[in-house]
Amino acid sequence: MRRVIVDSAIYRDGRRTKGPADLSDALAEARAAGNAFLWVGLHEPTEAEFDHVSAEFALHPLAVEDALKAHQRPKLEIYDDSLFVVLKPVVYEPESDRVTSDEVMLFVGDSFVVTVRHGEGAPLAAVRRRLEADPEVLRHGPTAVLYAISDEVVDHYIDVAGELQVDLEQLEADVFAPVGVSPSNTAERIYTAKRQVLEFRRAGGPLAGPMARLAGGDVPFVHESARPFFRDVSDHLIRANEQVEGLDRLLSDVLSAHLAQMGVRQNDDMRKISAWAAMAAVPTMVAGIYGMNFDHMPELTWTWSYPAVILLMAGIEIGLYRLFKRRGWL
């Protein structure tokens, strides 16, 4: 049977403790303690499965709808009883050189945080373990969870941007490789890379506003002391977005260079074809003239007419060849 609630625990003074299995009792115990909070993690819940959780934590229906449907833009929304944050982690697949994005939603409220994960590329177990190993950070409550997940997502943006940079440098080298050395599917690879960068921009670009808002403070359910940490995440996000913008410009330049090269090569091919056609037209024209059935063609009776015509055609061909060669048409 599929587990919807991946993990659930009460954290008191930054340390994991056992609590009631019932979410309502666990939340009441965390609030009564004053220095504790409840962290519930879910993975791709259905509407029926999420109804109990949303009812226990009094989550806003609009936020619940977004958490269930997924395919949301990164955003930050403030409701009366909770804060709703959407993050889009990105994953780089080296086997296919593809970038995919998943989604993580966080509900942050009074003594609780609920995380909803969509996709397999954004596991939060490692973040939870890292926080549990650092009680000094975790004692700051749900704010620490929001910061740790945001920091993990944004730091991975920088790693993925570095992987894409390596791929694009190889693509750029292939575009400027000599004819016959560069792969034949260069244009397809450029457009595929464009799609990967676009997927990346959809994840990181819209997140800049929410991170700046968290860094600026005055957000309910987020400690004022966390502002410098969110400012650090915002700075990393700006750097990641600048890298992505640079990759997008590089791809545009590579595409323009590739199209220009294709145009030059096509022009070269057309010049070569035209040159060879012109050289082929000369003997065709001469042979056509002497192939006409006229009675009065005195050259036909000359002894040296045949070698003279051959020499004439050969001379013209040599002259045209040298002319076209000198002009770079051949």
Image (cartoon, rainbow, N blue to C red):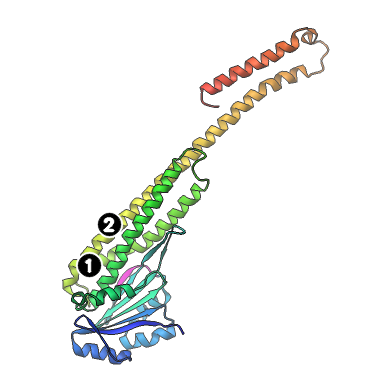
Q: Residue at x 35, y 88 (%)?
A: 55
Q: Which mark is residue 230?
A: 1
Amino acid type of disc 2?
Arg
Which residue is situated farthest in the right direction here?
A: 295
- Bounds of the magenta segment: 72-76
Mark positioned earlier in the residue sequence (2 or 1): 1
Quarter of the image holding residue 98?
bottom left
Q: Secondary structure at mark 2?
A: helix
Q: How far from the left and from the top, in percent, is residue 9?
A: 29, 84
Q: Residue furthest left?
A: 225
Asked if residue 30 can be seen in this view, the reply is yes
Which residue does the image show at 63% across and 16% down from the upper left? 316
Q: Quick check: is 74 in the magenta stretch?
A: yes
- Location of residue 39 in the rendering, given as x and y in whole percent from the top left corner: 29, 81
Total tally of numbered discs in the picture: 2
* Residue 183, percent from left and from top: 50, 45
Please say if 188 is above or below 65: above
Residue 26 is tagged as: none
Q: Within the image, what quadrant is residue 61 found in?
A: bottom left
Query: Which residue is more in the foreground, 68 or 314?
Result: 314
Name the image quarter holding residue 279. top right
Q: Is residue 204 above or below residue 266?
A: below
Query: Is 165 placed left or right of 145 in the picture?
Result: right
Q: Residues within 10 Å of mark 2 (few under 14, many from 20)?
A: some
Residue occupied by mark 2: 239
- Which secondary structure dominates the residues rendered in magenta? loop
Pick out the residue farthest to the front.
Answer: 133
Residue 79 can be seen, yes or no: no
Q: Amino acid at mark 1?
A: Phe
